[in-house]
Amino acid sequence: MMGGAGSQQLIRYTRELANFDAPLHLLVCVGRNTAIIKKINKIKLNTNVSLQIIPFTTRVSDLLAMSDVMITKPGPNACHEAMYAGVPLLIDLTANSLFWERGTIDIVKLYGRGAVVKKFKEVKPLVKKYITEKCSTKNVFKTLPRFEDQVRPIIHDLLAKSPLQPTLTMPSNAKYRVTR
């Protein structure tokens, strides 16, 4: 999965995993990038590798429920949804990431919720690791910071140091809101 717009990187990852030596079913989420479907369908798969191409969907949680590992860009939405579902992440850093995605990478590494892929040749051993070793991440929120205990004070601290001096309105029983 490489976001709603899809990515050419999906072709490279599919090629890398096409000759995986263990049974593997790939769910390749192309998003709105339907132009790459023909290229992906032309990739010759090993006899024990199967493939299903998924166009844009809002049902990411359903896909995660049947996944053992997720390869994705470091976008916070998909990564946090995978962590919540207990699915290990392989974060694509074969190209540069956006500066606001770096926090997601840090969280995944800090809490041991996956690995970073800097070169395509790394993906096969990492997928094998997370599939064969049955790396468990089901208790992800037992180790991640809780909003009330740890995240809320961090937000207050960051906002207090902001040059724009926002006012934070955060009732104890409501979602937080930032006003300027």
Image (cartoon, grey):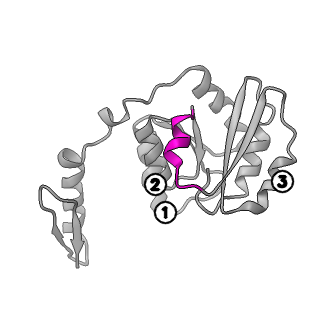
Residue hosting label 3 = 39
- Between 138 and 122, which is closer to the camera in this rendering? 138
The picture places residue 93, in percent across and down from the top left corner, at 61, 51
> Which residue is rendered at x = 76% and y = 50% of the image?
11
Q: Residues within 10 Å of mark 2 (few under 14, many from 20)?
A: few
Residue 162 appears left or right of 47? left
Q: Residues within 10 Å of mark 3 (few under 14, many from 20)?
A: few
Q: Secondary structure at mark 3?
A: helix
> Which residue is rendered at x = 18% and y = 54% of the image?
153
Q: Residue furthest left?
A: 172
Type of amino acid under label 1? Phe
* 86 over 117 or under it: above or below: above
Q: Secondary structure at mark 1?
A: helix
The picture places residue 178, in percent across and down from the top left corner, at 23, 70
Residue hosting label 2 = 77
Residues drawn in magenta: 57-67
Q: Residues within 10 Å of mark 1 (few under 14, many from 20)?
A: few
For the residues labelled 2 and 3, say whether their Cβ atoms are less than 8 Å apart.
no
Q: Mark 2 or 3 closer to N-term?
A: 3
Q: Mark 1 or 2 closer to N-term?
A: 2
The picture places residue 125, in percent across and down from the top left corner, at 67, 29
Q: Secondary structure at mark 2?
A: helix
> Residue 179 colored magenta?
no
* 133 over 27 or under it: above or below: above
Residue 99 bears which disc, if any?
A: 1
Type of amino acid under label 3? Lys
> Which residue is rendered at x = 24% and y = 59% of the image?
155
Residue 123 appears left or right of 146? right
Type of amino acid under label 2? Asn
